[in-house]
Amino acid sequence: MKLWKRNAVVAAIVLFVCVAVYLNWSYNNGRETISPDTGTGKTLGEAALVDGVTIVGQDGEEIPASTEGGADTLIDTYFADARLSRQQARDSALSLLRDAAASEDADQSVIDSANLSIQAMADYTMKESQIENLVTAKGYADCVAFISENSVSVVVAPPEGGLTAADVAKVTDIALSETGFSASQVKIIPAG
């Protein structure tokens, strides 16, 4: 009986990961570009992507996008997309865990496991938010944190000239203090 319960929990986790991958794929697959003449969207694939933005003229001809501010726009878009994907995956997993915990025929160990997973997700969400707020308070434009059971990754918008060793040390210190992980479990990644 315990083997069945363990397999059910593993299957639920695998399902959560698959749902997260699908949501991420479907979200990024539906991206649109903007035509300046009409302001309406156009599905990617119908025009080439230039610096993350495609502009289509009135005659349907592509106009190269200005690179001025392009990198900043891409980085800003990355952070918004990453947060949205993270939240969608968590919402989906949370829904499945709540359903498992509320099931009338669920064994107490399955309910307890689902409740522990829900608590862990809530804890991760709060810690990620705290890391993101503290990093931006240190003067970085933006960041997004991803916490798992055994590690934390923090993607940081690098200042002009890139991330220095001092920048990495500041962000690592914040991640260590908020999560209690060891330095070997923390990854700092510059965006862009």
Image (tube, rainbow, N blue to C red):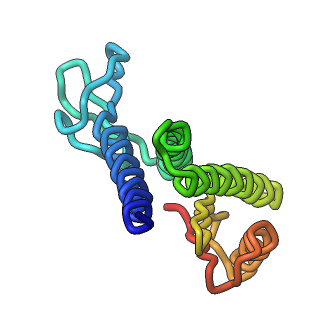
Residue in the picture at 58% in, 63% down: 155
Q: Residue at x 18, y 20 (%)?
A: 59
Rendering coords of residue 71 (x, y %): 49, 52
Looking at the image, the residue that sits furthest to the top is 38
In the image, taking residue 134 as reference, residue 90 lies left or right, namely left
**Extreme-front residue of the structure:** 1
Most foreground residue, 14 or 49 = 14
Which is more toward the observer, 116 or 188?
Answer: 116
Q: Please tell me which residue lies in front, 100 or 144.
A: 100
**Residue sitting at 80 percent across and 58 percent down?**
134
- On screen, residue 23 above or below 130: above
Q: Nearer the viewer, residue 130 or 180?
A: 180
Q: Position of residue 192 (x, y in %)?
A: 49, 61
Q: Is residue 140 left or right of residue 80?
A: right
Q: How many marks?
A: 0
188 up-or-down from 116: above or below = below
Q: Position of residue 82 (x, y in %)?
A: 51, 49
Whether residue 88 is visible: yes
Q: Quadrant of residue 48?
A: top left
Find the residue positioned furthest to the bottom. 184
Corner quadrant of residue 46: top left
Residue 141 visible in the current orientation: no
**The N terminus is located in which quarter?**
bottom left
* Residue 36 image offset from top left, x and y in percent: 36, 21
Residue at image point 37% right, 62% down: 4
